[in-house]
Amino acid sequence: MKIFEELESEVRSYARNFPRLFNKAEAEFIYDEEGKQYIDFLAGAGALNYGHNHPVFKQKLLDYIEANGITHSLDLHTEAKRAFLESFKEHILVPREMDYRLMFTGPTGTNSVEAALKLARKITGRTHVVAFTNGWHGQTLGALAMTANSHHRDGAGITLSGAHRIPYDGYLGDHVDTTEYLDKVLTDTSSGVDLPAAVIVETIQGEGGVNYCSIEWLRNLSAVCKKHDVLLIIDDIQAGCGRTGRFFSFEEAGIHPDMVTLSKSLSAYGLPFALVLFRPELDRWSPGEHNGTFRGNNHAFVTAKAALDLYWSDDEFAASVREKGEYIAKRLDAIVEKYGEGNFSAKGRGMFQGINCVNGEIASKITREAYRRGLIIETSGTNDEIIKLLCPLIIQQENLAKGIDILEESIRVICNHLDEIPEDSCYFDEVIIKGQKLEKDDAPNGEW
Ligand SMILES: Cc1ncc(COP(=O)(O)O)c(C=O)c1O
């Protein structure tokens, strides 16, 4: 592990919580070099909805590479792109009566957010975009301005401008509809709130702590945007691609956003791939006005198409996600009731759920214990107090149950021994004692 310490930047994060060398992965499992199997409830932070190395997608990709299919093409027309567009139209757009253009952006989520923001500003001639408390939209400067977390905002090093922040659904309590506030300040020309170009919103705030808005709130938000001629951008980068039991997380609301950003699981194989959907009349780009060397990843076109054909030609897969989502909700409610003593609560929608442990230290002790027991799971929220379940949607029911069993057992252990387990406890290859980093090899008998 020393090479990572020596050469890789201190910015690495997940690697600190799971300090193993991983070398293989299949479906809902990931393996370390010693062959230890972990159930993966992190799943690339939502990039692996179809699990690791899906055999059908892998074969399609291998065949494509074997046949010298084009890997890089800027935005030239390729067979792979055509096939993806045809499948996306057939399985996603047409059945949902969605009339949208697709714009392929640079390869990662934040690139599609940047493109959507830029287009909204260009079309409306306005500068500000309304974003929500606890929102998360990426790390490049435009998207970071929309992101709420101060740890990340502080890293910008310059003033982040162009966002107007308003409270997300539930932020001011269950009985306050914050879209009414938005409507009021946009109506009142003396509110001091300039008419924005757009509103950008996640239907479930993944990094922000698995906060989800009600369907009614989402409909109201859409109506307020329409009323004031403000574009609605749904950032479906984490909640989209089936996570909620529908391809898009906003489908239940019956709304048609002006723009939708997609990335993470879109490629279906963990390959970098991002796009923006927008209504055709919003396609006011001139050729090359917004571009990027890696826009449109042909390998991702191949695997993404394979996923659309396999899982989205009917409702069977989506129904299985909804069913598993109900199972997760039941299990989490039971865990909260049994161990929570009013301190924990469960939240989320579909297969995007979490346990609020209120306290980040407790949540991290639980996830460390789970890791020791063979479950990889992460936290999110302002103080990392939410344990976030993001397992692959294709997970076998028995492994889903097993993963939640491990989580439950970890909660039981931590709840029973809360006072006894020190912060830098014994499960890791490295610990920090009195500010000094020590590795497992330094420990007596290799054990802490
Ligand atoms: C909702 C949402 N938007 C945007 C992003 C940024 O995506 P990326 O990290 O691929 O740039 C994320 C990443 O977690 C996200 O969850």
Image (cartoon, rainbow, N blue to C red):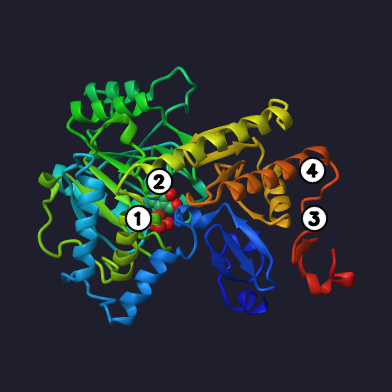
**Which numbered disc, 1 or 3, marks the residue that appears first in the sequence?**
1
Q: CA distance from mark 2 to mark 3?
A: 41 Å
Q: Position of residue 198 (x, y in %)?
A: 25, 39
Q: Position of residue 154 (x, y in %)?
A: 48, 52
Identity of the residue drawn at 49% across and 42% down: 351
| Labels 2 & 1 near each other (Cβ < 8 A) | yes
- Given residues 121 and 77, the one toward you in this image is 77
- Given residues 11 and 337, the one toward you in this image is 337
Q: Dot 3 lies on which element?
A: loop
Ligand 1 neighbours mark 3 (CB distance < 8 Å): no
**Residue 23, numbered circle:** none
| Labels 1 & 4 near each other (Cβ < 8 A) | no
Dot 3 alpha-carbon crowd within 10 angstroms: few under 14, some 14 to 19, many 20 or more: some
**Residue 413, numbered circle:** 4
**Which numbered disc, 4 or 3, marks the residue that appears first in the sequence?**
4
Q: Is residue 210 visible?
A: no
**Residue 317, numbered circle:** 2
On-image quarter of the C terminus: bottom right
- Amino acid of disc 4: Val
Q: CA distance from mark 1 to mark 3?
A: 45 Å
Q: CA distance from mark 1 to mark 4?
A: 41 Å
**Which numbered disc, 2 or 4, marks the residue that appears first in the sequence?**
2
Q: Quarter of the image holding residue 65?
A: bottom left
| Labels 2 & 4 near each other (Cβ < 8 A) | no
**Which numbered disc, 1 or 4, marks the residue that appears first in the sequence?**
1
Q: Position of residue 197 (x, y in %)?
A: 22, 40
